[in-house]
Amino acid sequence: MHDSEPGLQNAAASRDGVKTIRAAVLVGFMGAGKSTVGRELGRQLSWPFEDLDDRIESQEGRSVEQIFRESGEAAFRVAEHRALQQLISGLKSEPRIVALGGGAFVQADNAALLESSGIPIVFLNASPEELFRRCEEQGTNRPLQRDRAEFLKLYEARHPHYRKAKFQVDTTGKDVSTVAAEIGRLLGLTAKF
Ligand code: S3P
């Protein structure tokens, strides 16, 4: 893709105005499919995919679960913000599809950082019951998953934050490639099959 083509040559020009950031960030609750869909969208567009949690884990030399257990959520959020800052600075050199962990966009400093970058943000949603079912099925160790009631409560508390994303896609009942293609269309990107 060239800079003159439509799509994600958004207003996120760097300060010197020479480069533009070509990226999309996927946000949403646990179980929304941010990483799975992001990886597929990256494949469709031939853009690299990055999961912010993976960057945190390699920077910290510990798994997300370990960071929560050994240092607590506040320490995780500090590491998450640092990783996001670094990730955004690196976006000037190459395009990327990025998946954030479920709590990242809820943090005001992260939301402000993303907002000022101009990178399109896509909220992947599904009903909280559906999200809970997916998380249960996946069996991944998510420190904030807890029981059903807590899960639904956290979803309700976070939903107003996710809704600040410019784009929203409902993933209920759709397969991964359909959701990825829908995002591509929504953002004016052409898939390269
Ligand atoms: C979190 C979600 C996780 C991970 C961490 C915190 C959250 O990512 O970042 O456990 O606050 O909802 P996923 O949304 O990919 O599970």
Image (cartoon, rainbow, N blue to C red):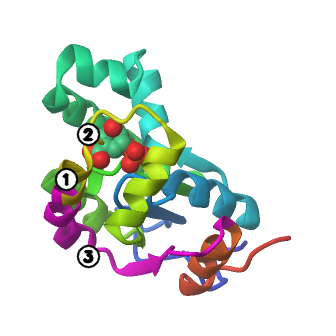
* Image: magenta residue range: 153-176
Name the image quarter holding residue 156.
bottom left
Q: Is residue 61 above or below residue 123?
A: above
Of labels 3 and 1, earlier in sequence is: 1
- Which label sits on residue 149? 1
Residue at mark 3 to residue at mark 2: CA–CA distance: 23 Å
Figure quarter occupied by ligand 1: top left
Residue carrying label 3: 163
Q: Quadrant of the C terminus?
A: bottom right
Residue 92 visible? The answer is no
Of labels 3 and 2, earlier in sequence is: 2
Q: Categorize mark 1 by other alpha carbons within 10 Å: few (<14), some (14-19), many (20+).
A: few
Q: Position of residue 105 (x, y in %)?
A: 27, 57
Residue carrying label 2: 146
Q: Amino acid at mark 2?
A: Arg
Q: Amino acid at mark 3?
A: Arg
| Residue contact between numbered discs 3 and 2, judged by CB atoms under 8 Å | no
At numbered mark 2, what does the secondary structure look like: helix, strand or loop?
A: loop
